[in-house]
Amino acid sequence: MTYCVGILVRDGLVMIADTRTNAGLDNIATFRKLNVFEKPGDRVLTLATAGNLAISQSVVSLVTEGIENPETGETDTIWNQPSMFRSAQLVGRAIREVYRLDGPMLEKKNLTFDVSMLLGGQIKGGRLRLFMVYAAGNFIEATADTPYLQIGEHKYGKPILDRAVKYDYDLHDALKLGLISMDSTMRSNLGVGMPIDFAVVRRDGLGAEASHRIEAGEPYFHDLRERWSAALRKAHQDIPRPPYGPRES
């Protein structure tokens, strides 16, 4: 269980992930699902993961430690890829490699190979990009028409983003909307919970402008939750009642 969202706007990128993982109601733990790979001035990449924790951790380890490139004989890592597209291909290769090693045994145990990832960031000489990588290792890319991508328990937070997020939105307003989307998800799904990790990457900054963990009870997030709830109640009250009364005889 998890919820991760990436929002790509004109000024930059926002990535947000919760940290809850559970294998039953009485076995809840906290694990970081948002990884930031940063070499200031050269590259900044963010990788958010959802699905089976063992699979996603293996994939992150592979892209960090490296996979042999059969064409060159060299070791490909997240640190030496020349572009975001090649980085997304590397993540896809890592997913397929983990499936090659662990997939057959998972199938014997009637377990699903469940993993999906959001990869966003920028490498020097290229543009800021955001991808969603599927369990098959293939991927799609966010565009100006569809400036956000989600993985995990996305259905509760999606209506917020559908109504509000636009490509020309302010970067930190995009962060605010992403946090509202996360709050809406947590209120409706116990499988998603605090703490929340987020990263903000400004276009052409080649570094994380902000990288922070929001703990339970943090004043800003508590205030955001209360204000959003109050705003929804007021909006509901301000809308006229439906004109559908009892039928006239």
Image (cartoon, grey):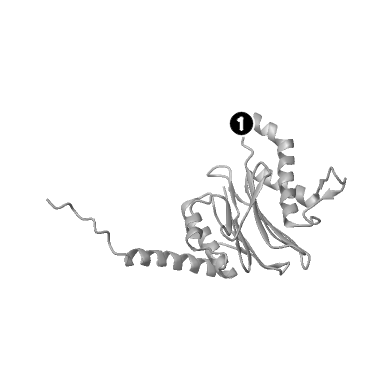
Seen from the viewer's position, the closer of residues 226 and 51 is 51
Residue farthest along the top direction in this orientation: 108
Residue 169 vertical placement versus 86 (above, below): below
Residue at the image point whose x is 20% and y is 55% from the top: 245
Residue 206 vertical placement versus 21 (above, below): below
Seen from the viewer's position, the closer of residues 32 and 27 is 32
Query: Residue 135: image x %, image y %?
Result: 65, 42
Query: Residue 34: image x %, image y %?
Result: 66, 56
For this view, does 177 lie left or right of residue 142? left
- Location of residue 210 by image quarter: bottom right
Say which amino acid is labelled 1. Answer: Asn
- How many numbered marks are there? 1
Residue 85 in view, yes or no: yes
Residue 4 in view, yes or no: no
Residue 41 vertical placement versus 77 (above, below): below
Residue farthest along the front direction in this orientation: 145
Residue 232 vertical placement versus 153 (above, below): below
Label 1 secondary element: loop
Residue farthest along the right direction in this orientation: 73
The crowding category of the residue bearing disc 1, from other C-alpha atoms within 10 Å (few below 14, some 14 to 19, many at least 20), is: few
- Location of residue 232 by image quarter: bottom left
For this view, does 248 lie left or right of residue 112? left
Seen from the viewer's position, the closer of residues 108 and 77 is 77
Query: Residue 69: image x %, image y %?
Result: 83, 45
Seen from the viewer's position, the closer of residues 173 and 50 is 173
Residue located beneath label 1 in the image: 110
Residue at the image point whose x is 56% and y is 66% from the top: 174
Residue at the image point whose x is 66% and y is 48% from the top: 139
